[in-house]
Amino acid sequence: MPHCFSDVNDFMKIGGLRIVSLTNISVVTALANDFSYEDIFVKQLESLMDEGDVIIGISGSGNSMNVVKALEYARDCCNFRLSKYLKRFIDLKKDG
């Protein structure tokens, strides 16, 4: 877990929030090996994500398929809505 998430997580335990980083290198390597690099975040969200969770996806180019697929999964499974700023980089409009 990146250092900043660890600090925030310690602080937020008081408010009952759960903060999870999906970048644990052991988990990422295992999922990339067993599935694909494009699915490393989706596979984690499948077991961690609940209705009402907030997802933050960061991609330098805005086109990283593993981030795009994770946001698509969040949108489809939990009625997750993208911020207007993210839509500039990724068009994930919900069908129908």
Image (spheres, grey):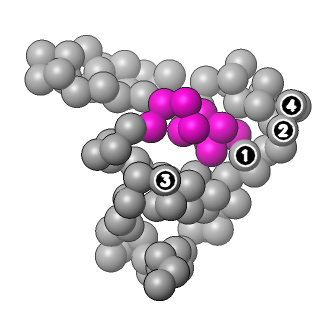
Query: Which quadrant of the figure has residue 45?
Result: top right
Judge from the rendering whether residue 63 lies leftward or rightward of residue 32; answer left or right.
left
Per the model, the C-alpha gap separating discs 2 and 4 is 4 Å
Q: Do the CB atoms of the residues marked 3 and 2 lie less than 8 Å apart?
A: no
> In this figure, which residue is indicated by the disc labeled 4?
34
Which residues are the magenta region? Answer: 40-49
> Foreground mark, 1 or 3?
3
- Whether residue 51 is situated above or below residue 33 in the rendered picture: below
When the figure is inspected, residue 90 is found, relative to residue 57, above or below; the finding is: below
User: Can you give x and y, in whole percent of width and height, for residue 37 in the image?
Assistant: 79, 44
Amino acid type of the residue tagged 3 in the rendering? Cys
Instruction: Report x, y in % for residue 49.
Output: 45, 37
Residue that protrudes farthest toward the bottom in the picture = 96
- The tag earlier along the polypeptide, 3 or 4, is 4
Q: Is residue 37 left or right of residue 21?
A: right
Q: Does the image show residue 96?
A: yes
Marks 3 & 4, CB-CB < 8 Å contact: no
| Prevailing secondary structure of the magenta residues | helix
Give me the disc on residue 35.
2
Q: Secondary structure at mark 2?
A: loop
Residue highlighted by disc 3: 77
Number of residues whose C-alpha sits closer than 10 Å to that of mark 2, classed few (under 14), some (14–19) or many (20 or more): few
**Residue placed farthest to the front in the image?**
96
Measured as percent of width and height from the top left, residue 34 is found at 86, 31
Q: Amino acid at mark 4?
A: Asp
Q: Secondary structure at mark 1?
A: helix
**56 lies above or below 47:** below
Labels 2 and 4 touching (C-beta < 8 A): yes
Q: Which mark is residue 39?
A: 1
Residue in the image at 38% along x and 59% along y:
80
Residue count near mark 3 (Cα–Cα under 10 Å), binned few <14, some 14–19, many ≥20? few
In the drawing, does residue 94 fall left or right of residue 82?
right
